Amino acid sequence: MLSVSEAFSLVLNHSLVVSAESIPLTQAAGRVLREPLVADRDLPPFDRVSMDGIAIQYRAFANGQRRFPIIGTQFAGQPAQTLTNETACLEVMTGAMLPAGADAVIRYEDIQMVEGTAEIRLETIQLGQNIHHRAVDRKQNEELVPAGVRLGPAEMAVAASVGKTSVLVSKPPRIALISTGDELVDVSESPKPYQIRRSNTYLLQTVLQTTGAETALFHLPDDPLAMETELKTILADYDALVLSGGVSAGKADFVPTVMAKLGVNQVFHQVAQRPGKPFWFGASDTGKVAFGLPGNPVSTFLCAYRYLVPWLKGSIGLPVLPPSVAQLAQVVSFPPKLTYFLPVSLSVNPEGVWQAKPLPGSGSADYANLLHCNGFMELPPERSEFNESEAFPVYTFR
Ligand SMILES: Nc1nc2c(c(=O)[nH]1)N[C@H]1C(S)=C(S)[C@@H](COP(=O)(O)OP(=O)(O)OC[C@H]3O[C@@H](n4cnc5c(N)ncnc54)[C@H](O)[C@@H]3O)O[C@H]1N2
Ligand code: MOO
Ligand SMILES: [Mg+2]
């Protein structure tokens, strides 16, 4: 049986081909850039006054002068004036161009205004003080943001400042989230004694919210012909399918055979892990990808975080980051030769180290247990005893 890392590599090898689209900047927050953002001018584009006050020539102050006649005012949003008299000053406002001939700005707080003159009340000043010099932040034509970065607040501010009215971003992949099973009824229905309400597609939709994918929910019965008909349409309309249920050894587990009939070939079936051992994964020659996640809700949940989310991030051009690491807060025993994804509650101890408190719950159908957890700790298959304070990777979900 495949190991978790082998299965993960195979999943990442089948990334979606996500096309790019140009959209207005006003709609681009949260999307992934597909072009670099380049400085169209120096940043800042001119010597910018950074404090309200007066602009003088430093040499006059260095020569002992303290009282400067005010010969005008330089506001922001105006072309630069000139300090025509090197022993005079201009009042200047934050954001204004530094007047030509001036090379130091003194704050209003450090001067006293007396009858049209400004008297500086400082012992020393620096050449160039309170001036945000042209190009100190970035130079014209410098790459400010590389492609493959999500447009957060800082990136949006930079995009606006370099005049990008529209930006090239990844198109959101269209993903169908499909529950399967005759025992499952809609959330609005009253289940009969042998039925339950379906929950996995709601779980999956919430997990994928952070990726910006477009999702739609479907439900299929345990009937191979009906499944085939409906899945054919869904396959044509969506880039990827995430199914839950119907992949283990039961007489009504039809997902792998139906997918194969539709040209979605098995890449693997079963991974040496708990939960989620019956995980099925396939891809078609036309570039469609399908995840057959095991139906037990904790298995669906774990597989979504461990495989689906990194796969989707990689596909849309975001970096796939390694998991964080935490210390086990108590001894854990797990004899099967499987990678064990242990539900944990994470907290930081007084030394600033992440601690993982095991909350195994009653098994992979116990989804209510996850309400108290915020991650899965990945314990390796070749060991059966895990000591307190040993560190292992954790996949967090809160
Ligand atoms: N003989 C074997 N039986 C089972 C094996 C095995 O290896 N050999 N594996 C077990 C494991 S592990 C899991 S996990 C499950 C996976 O089963 P399936 O993927 O085939 O899923 P189903 O049989 O359709 O359902 C399993 C279970 O999950 C519930 N379920 C399914 N979908 C939803 C949903 N959308 N919302 C809520 N609950 C859902 C379903 O009612 C079943 O209780 O197989 C074991 N068996
Ligand atoms: O994946 Mo199953 O959920 O191990 O029970
Ligand atoms: Mg089954």
Image: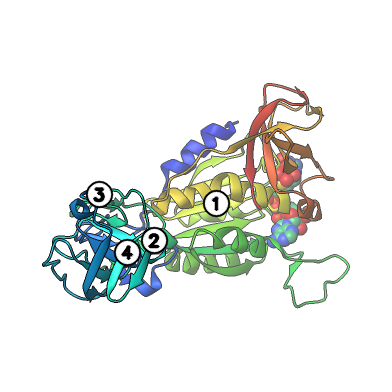
* Label 3 crowd (10 A; few <14 / some 14-19 / many >=20): some
**Residue 287 on image: x %, y %:** 38, 53
Q: Report the residue at 64% width, 38% height from top.
A: 394
**Residue with the mark numbered 3:** 127
Residue at mark 3 to residue at mark 4: CA–CA distance: 18 Å
Q: In the rendered view, would you say 269 is above or below 296?
A: above
Q: Quadrant of ligand 2?
A: top right
Q: Earlier in the sequence, mark 2 or mark 1?
A: 2
Q: Is mark 2 within 8 Å of ligand 1?
A: no
The amino acid on which the numbered mark 2 sits, given as a three-letter code, is: Asp
Mark 2, other Cα within 10 Å: few <14 / some 14–19 / many ≥20 = few
- Quarter where residue 200 is shown: bottom right
Would you name the residue on which mark 4 appears? 119
The image shows residue 266 at horizontal and vertical percentages of 50, 45
Spot occupied by residue 261 in the image (x, y as percentages of width and height): 49, 55
**Which colouring convention does the figure follow?**
rainbow
Q: Earlier in the sequence, mark 3 or mark 4?
A: 4
Q: Is residue 251 left or right of residue 44?
A: right
Compared with residue 308, is residue 152 higher up or lower down, i.e. above or below? below
